[in-house]
């Protein structure tokens, strides 16, 4: 490709940035190609509520905690698409899955009006069938009540995707002391006021910095 064409190509992401969007080439290493293939495969047959870039950030985090002991968990499973992705990235680890499987609980006044009670209701049996063969455990019902039986479990990776203030705050309070040092937590929907408020309040007295990624996620590494 001529030098001038290459320069013109570099302007494409800048044009997207001017329109308030990010365009990123992700096909530049075997690791990344593998992540893209897995994500596109899951998306071809299942509702996935996160952006491709967000999914890749989760896969990158799971690879990064390879040396950290502990299980994995997701609060907010819905159709099981993100759970399938998480489990496929580290199939030898147990993945604990928490959801009402009746959709969102009633949002509070702290939450975005875009969230509605019973939104994202998927049948537990159907999600179990989809994840058949994966090393997963299901906890149906209202979190954190459903977590009482596994309070001694320790984690290397946690995905919070429960959309609402109460659930996010409860997720941070429950998982933070159970995350091993070097373990990572990623949370979706940091653009929503309930989730960002839960993070601000929770991290007021914590030593870890948390930061937002491209897309609508934020996360931290446990110190
Ligand atoms: C956006 S969906 C999860 C999407 C999924 N992670 C994906 O990417 O496909 C949010 C889920 O959080 C669950 N949820 C919210 N608050 C909860 C709580 N307190 N206990 C259990 N599940 C909860 C809802 O039932 C809903 O299925």
Image (cartoon, rainbow, N blue to C red):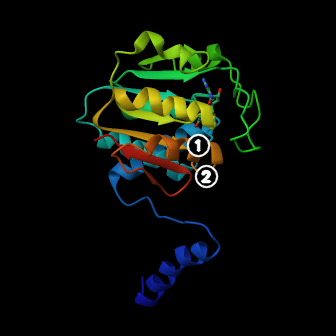
From what the image shows, is residue 73 above or below residue 33? above
Left or right of 57 in this view: 196:
right
Q: Position of residue 182 (x, y in %)?
A: 27, 39
From what the image shows, is residue 176 above or below residue 223? above
* Residue pictured at 60% horizontal, 67% vertical: 21
From what the image shows, is residue 12 above or below residue 48? below
Residue under label 2, please give it.
191
- Residue 193 in view of the camera: yes
- Residue 36 in view of the camera: no
Label 1 to label 2, Cα distance in Å?
Answer: 7 Å
Give residue 195's mark.
1
Give the quarter of the figure containing the C terminus: top left
* Residue pictured at 77% horizontal, 34% vertical: 116
Q: Position of residue 101 (x, y in %)?
A: 65, 20
The answer to which quarter of the image holds residue 90 is top left
Left or right of 101 in this view: 94:
left
SS at mark 1 in the image: helix
């Amino acid at each position: 490709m001529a030098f001038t064409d290459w320069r013109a190509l570099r302007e494409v992401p800048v044009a997207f940035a001017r329109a308030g969007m990010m365009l990123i080439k992700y096909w530049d290493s075997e690791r990344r190609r593998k992540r893209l293939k897995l994500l596109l495969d899951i998306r071809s047959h299942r509702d996935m509520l996160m952006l491709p870039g967000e999914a890749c950030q989760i896969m990158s985090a799971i690879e990064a905690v390879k040396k950290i002991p502990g299980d994995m968990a997701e609060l907010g499973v819905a159709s099981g698409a993100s759970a399938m992705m998480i489990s496929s990235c580290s199939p030898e680890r147990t993945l604990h899955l928490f959801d009402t499987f009746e959709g969102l609980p009633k949002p509070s006044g702290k939450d975005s009006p875009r969230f509605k009670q019973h939104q994202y209701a998927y049948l537990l049996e159907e999600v179990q069938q989809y994840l058949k063969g994966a090393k997963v455990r299901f906890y149906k019902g209202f979190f954190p009540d459903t977590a009482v039986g596994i309070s001694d479990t320790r984690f290397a990776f946690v995905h919070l995707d429960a959309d609402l203030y109460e659930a996010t705050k409860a997720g941070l309070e429950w998982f933070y002391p159970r995350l091993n040092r070097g373990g990572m937590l990623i949370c979706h929907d940091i653009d929503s006021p309930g989730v960002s408020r839960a993070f601000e309040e929770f991290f007021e007295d914590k030593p870890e910095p948390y930061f937002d990624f491209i897309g609508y996620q934020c996360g931290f590494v446990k110190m």
